[in-house]
Image (cartoon, grey):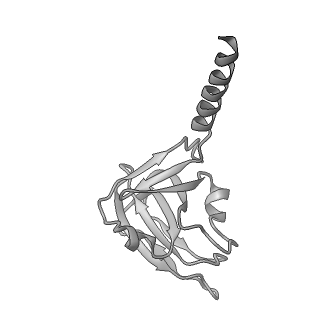
Amino acid sequence: MKSLLAPLLFAFATAASAATHEAPAVQLHGHRFTTEFATNDASRARGLMMRTELAADHSMLFVFGDDDQRWFWMKNTLIPLDILYFDSGRKLVSVQASVPPCKADPCPSYPSDLPARYVLELPAGTAARIGAMVGDELTIEGTIGAVQ
């Protein structure tokens, strides 16, 4: 009996550990994206700068402490992105689709239509591909941590 119990306990512990260490993710319009959280000034300023690719199932979620008008720009961002703005209820309020990298200063800004608390960056064309629409709800999986 003891010889059967040890492998069973190990398998259970391994499964429980894997479940608690899953990468953070978001879900939008029935699609799941692993995500990186940008919750402080430094990580929000850096964003996806200097990256040469973003996997189709990956995203970055910018988290702010309040709802406010948000503007994003693409300085030093090398890949085109969809920029989706969500209010404090995590409802999609604005989309800037297929925003190109900035090739020269001054870089244009891409504003939200309404105040936003969360901003999700996805590979360009993703919002259209998944059929994301204003009013869609964003589900956030994982712990965001303190917003600074």
Q: Residue at 58% of width from left, 76% of height from top? A: 74
- The image quarter containing residue 84 is bottom left
Q: Is residue 108 above or below residue 34?
A: below
Q: Residue at 59% of width from left, 51% of height from top? A: 39
Q: Residue at 67% of width from left, 76% of height from top? A: 76
- The image quarter containing residue 135 is bottom left
Image position, residue 22 (x, y; %):
59, 43
Image position, residue 23 (x, y; %):
59, 47
Q: Nearer the viewer, residue 50 or 75?
A: 50
Q: Residue at 47% of width from left, 79% of height from top? A: 98
Task: Judge from the rendering whether residue 18 lies leftward or rightward of residue 137; answer left or right.
Answer: right
Image position, residue 119 (x, y; %):
48, 60
Quadrant position of the N terminus in the picture: top right
Q: Nearer the viewer, residue 97 or 125?
A: 125
Q: Is residue 129 above or below residue 135?
A: below
Image position, residue 139 (x, y; %):
41, 49
